Amino acid sequence: MSTFTVEGKLLLPEDGREIASVVCTITLREPTRSQRGEWHGTLTITGDQREFQRVHLQQGEFILRLSDGHEGRIIVTNVPVIPEGIGTFLFQGSGGLE
């Protein structure tokens, strides 16, 4: 298992439109003969949160594109709202991180 922190973008799965810049910490478990691989982590929006807030009310699945070129679909599982806006939230990878 490995954990790393990287910058990236959240995109809409329907049309690839960018809705937020993020910093994320990802935990990645490589597949083995007896276990499927998985990835999950935390995201923090770095900048304007309004577009994410508007879209998140309608859906929980997004594309996460990392600054190193990797990308994968994620399902947002928990979005805490704090007085300053949205806090760090949790996601689960849906499929591979390629």
Image (tube, helix red, strand yellow):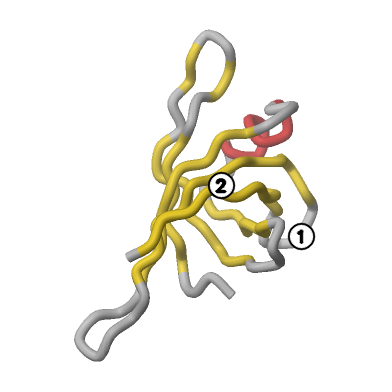
Residue 24 vertical position relative to residue 95 in the rendered view, above or below: above
Q: Tell me which label, 1 or 2, sits earlier in the chain.
A: 1
Is residue 79 rendered to the left or right of residue 7? Answer: left
Pick out the residue farthest to the left.
34
Which of the 4 image quarters holds residue 23? top right
Q: What's the residue at 71%, 40% (across, down)? A: 20
**Coordinates of residue 90 in the picture (x, y in percent):** 42, 42
Residue 72 vertical position relative to residue 31 in the rendered view, above or below: above
Quick one: label 1, few (<14), some, or many (20+) residues within 10 Å?
few
Residue where numbered disc 2 is placed: 59
Quick one: label 2, few (<14), some, or many (20+) residues within 10 Å?
few
Residue where numbered disc 1 is placed: 16
- Quadrant where the N terminus sits is bottom left
Q: Who is closer to the viewer here, 92 or 70?
A: 70
Count of numbered circles on the image: 2
Q: What's the residue at 52%, 8% (across, down)? A: 83
Residue 65, numbered circle: none
- Quadrant where the C terminus sits is bottom right
Q: Secondary structure at mark 1?
A: loop
Pick out the residue farthest to the top.
83
Which amino acid does the dot numbered 2 rest on? Gln
Q: Secondary structure at mark 2?
A: loop
Contact? badges 1 and 2 (CB < 8 Å)? no
**Coordinates of residue 87 in the picture (x, y in percent):** 50, 25
Is residue 38 rendered to the left or right of residue 22? Answer: left
Which amino acid does the dot numbered 1 rest on? Gly
Which of the 4 image quarters holds residue 51? top right
- Between label 1 and label 2, give the one nearer the viewer: 1
